Amino acid sequence: KIDCNQIGKLLRSLNLNPDDEDIRKIEKDVGNRRVSFEEFLPIFMKEKKNNREVSVQEFIDTLNVFDKDGAGKVSSGELRHVLTALGNKLRNREVDELFSDVGEYHGFIHTADFVKMVMSNP
């Protein structure tokens, strides 16, 4: 059995990508208790069915909104702001780790390198 507050981490470790709102709904539905494998399996199957894979190119195209001069790079400051302030927010140390893995060059992150690195590390 696992604690209900571990369901999101478990789903993500199984290569699914539920957002924080989905996880809160699952936790509310389950209640504040431990969940058995038999109870978790239908949750997993539902999330797997709802999971939509995003292609590398779709991800790059999305980040290109921030590529002001079309050079295939985005401002690391702007990307940090997006990652820490919008949607499923990351902590600054998580962004630092991402940036150190991909490399930051003169205040910019190369979009394709960043996307490939992120998508290769589920």
Image (cartoon, grey):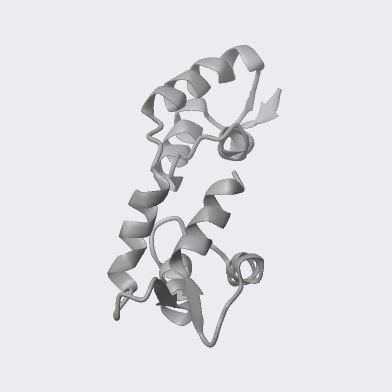
Q: Quadrant of residue 105?
A: bottom right
Q: Nearer the viewer, residue 77 or 107?
A: 107
Quadrant, the C terminus? top right
Q: How many labels were placed on the picture?
A: 0
Residue 111 lies, in percent from the top left, at 44, 66
Residue 88 lies, in percent from the top left, at 45, 55
**Outermost residue to the right:** 1
Residue lying at 48% horizontally and 57% vertically, measured from the top left: 115
Q: Nearer the viewer, residue 6 or 62?
A: 62
Q: Quick check: 26 above or below 105? A: above
Q: Quick check: 65 above or below 51? A: below
**Outermost residue to the front:** 71
Q: Quick check: 6 above or below 38? A: below
Residue lying at 56% horizontally and 33% vertically, measured from the top left: 11
Left/right placement of residue 75 relative to residue 58 reads right
Quadrant, the N terminus? top right
Q: Quick check: 16 above or below 118? A: above
Residue 5 lies, in percent from the top left, at 60, 39
Residue 60 lies, in percent from the top left, at 38, 58
**Outermost residue to the bottom:** 106
Residue lying at 45% horizontally and 39% vertically, measured from the top left: 18
